[in-house]
Image: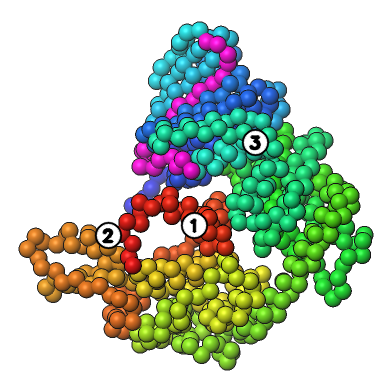
Amino acid sequence: MASTTYDASTIQVLEGLEPVRKRPAMYIGGTGIEGYHHLLWEIVDNTVDEAMNGHATTVNVTLHADGRSATVTDNGRGIPVEMHPTAKRPALEVILCTLHAGGKFEGKAYAASGGLHGVGSSVVNALSEEMVATVKRGGIEYRQTFRRGKPRTQLEKVGEARGTGTTIKFRPDPDTFGDLAFESDRVRERLETIAYIHKGLRILFRDEMSGGYEEFRHDGGIRDWALALAKKTGRTPIVPDPFYACKENGVKVEMALAWTDGTRELFNSYANGIPTSSGGTHETGAKDAITKAVRNYIDTHSLQPKGITLAAEDIREGVVCVTSVFLAEPQFQGQTKEKLNNPEMRGAVENAIRTTLEQFLNHNRTVADVVVTRVIQAARARLASRSAEDQVRRKSPVNNRLNLPGKLADCSSNDASESELFIVEGDSAGGSAKQGRDRETQAILPLRGKVLNTEQASLKKLMENEELSNIVSALGCGIGKDFNRDRLRYHRVILLMDADVDGHHIATLLLTFFYRYLPGLIDGGYLYLAQPPLYRIDVGQQTHWAADDAEKARVLKKLPPRATPEVTRFKGLGEMPPKVLFDTTLDPRKRRLLKVTIPAGEHQSTDQMFADLMGKDAAPRYHAIMESGAEFDELDV
């Protein structure tokens, strides 16, 4: 074994912005699509900081035609360009080329801001193939160009200028991000949210890739945002106007609250205009305020129903809440700022909101009665759900097999970590799967026809559905709020449907069910989609398998010119001999599985997607089909 030297000569010191290029994930969370857009958010947040402190009114964001470069402009004060007294370089160069350099540390230049660490714009510079900074200040326009964190040119005077402001154009470095590009829909959604949070701020968005141009300005602020969120996620408000409160005492606390008919609560929170997707102490304070205010109202007016205990989840069911706080020294979790950690903010938000919400309820008895009725209904539904779940729950995941559905061909292993459940489309395919499976670790549950669309069905109707009840019974982990992963009988739940349109539809219906009622399977990484072949391609003694038309085309393209392939299209899994089904789809050594996951920060858009595509309102589906019509030229019907 070769010896390694560990002495002073092995200690490496990274200078300037080298640490950022060496370990970019430490500063932007990763080098995937989230990190790519995080560069844009850092620059946009700087412009919003100017507006937040009363120095700017308009922000311009442009995605250029190449899809990989962007320009952000504000009409704020302009980044200082004078020589820095100690660095002996222009302040602009110091800010863009030095970690922990900025004007937000002491609170003199900014009373509140989203950027506090002095690393945002310099990180963008370090991870950009090129950055061009243009500043209008003191009647002069200045410009300086940078490349991968280092100046390419000196700061130069371009000429006279009217007004003030800063423009940053940058192109993320392909050496770090590969072939990634900006996604206009993602950028548009973020900019519109910013316009809601900072009411009165004018944001202009130009997408040169599509030629689109939009202006965002929401003078109603987060009050309008709460209603927009309810609409986007398929919820209908049960009270026309949302509750709104704004208090300022050292910190500014603003909250808008809409009660809806949704089955889940939705909390969006922001700290100094930064979306805190993982919540934090301010969001917890908002939840405390709502729970205590409604509970106090119920107690004061003796509205507590007999025999029913109201839980916090009942009080907040269907709530859509937007909480925004502005404070001098926010303590974010990491540079990506997804969570606010200031311990004092929980009490500050609760104290600012709870009393105001109680007064609102007491002075608006009609609204309050609607809210209380909604809460009591939620509690009764929760108790009914638990009772119904008890009827199908398996008492012991290991020792008791008496309550399992009759169609289930269970595996012999009692070790959930090695056990798999294949949910199979149809009795015919189920028969082939039962014969071809590994009986030790693989269980088969065949379904009959297309299952219930749970996005449009009540919980009572769901529990009366035999196919879905069989799934719940087979899994043994409970449903909805009673989900317990410790009782899960299989650590791989695999949807095995035909590789055609009907199969995809059934898989979508099942995904809707799992997302709405068993989200713990997805969060825990237990849910998968099998990838059975649609085509068999025989060439001489060789056999190739293709999951779809695109893969079939790739296989045929790779064959020798004189080859005469025989292509067989399977009408369904039931056509496959058991051994072929095992070799192509069930065998862990050869099969292909897709794990069902929800990317970080995408839960809201996922929720909206299910509401749009599977909900009762057909309009969103119609728009989706019309907008994507070109993709449906060759439907498999």
Q: Which residue is mark 2?
A: 550
Q: Which residue is mark 3?
A: 218
Label disc, if present, on residue 621 of the rendered structure: 1
- Residue at mark 3 to residue at mark 2: CA–CA distance: 45 Å
| Mark in the foreground, 1 or 3 | 1
On whether residue 168 falls in the magenta region, the answer is: yes
**Residue 10 % position (x, y):** 42, 39
Establish if 201 lies above or below 162: below
Q: Residue at x 45, y 79 (%)?
A: 449
Residue 426, quarter of the rendered image? bottom left
Give, as a three-letter code, the residue at label 2.
Ala
Give, as a three-letter code, the residue at label 1.
Arg
Q: Residues within 10 Å of mark 1 (few under 14, many from 20)?
A: some
**Residue 94 % position (x, y):** 53, 21
Q: Which residues are drawn in magenta?
A: 161-185
**Residue 574 % position (x, y):** 33, 82
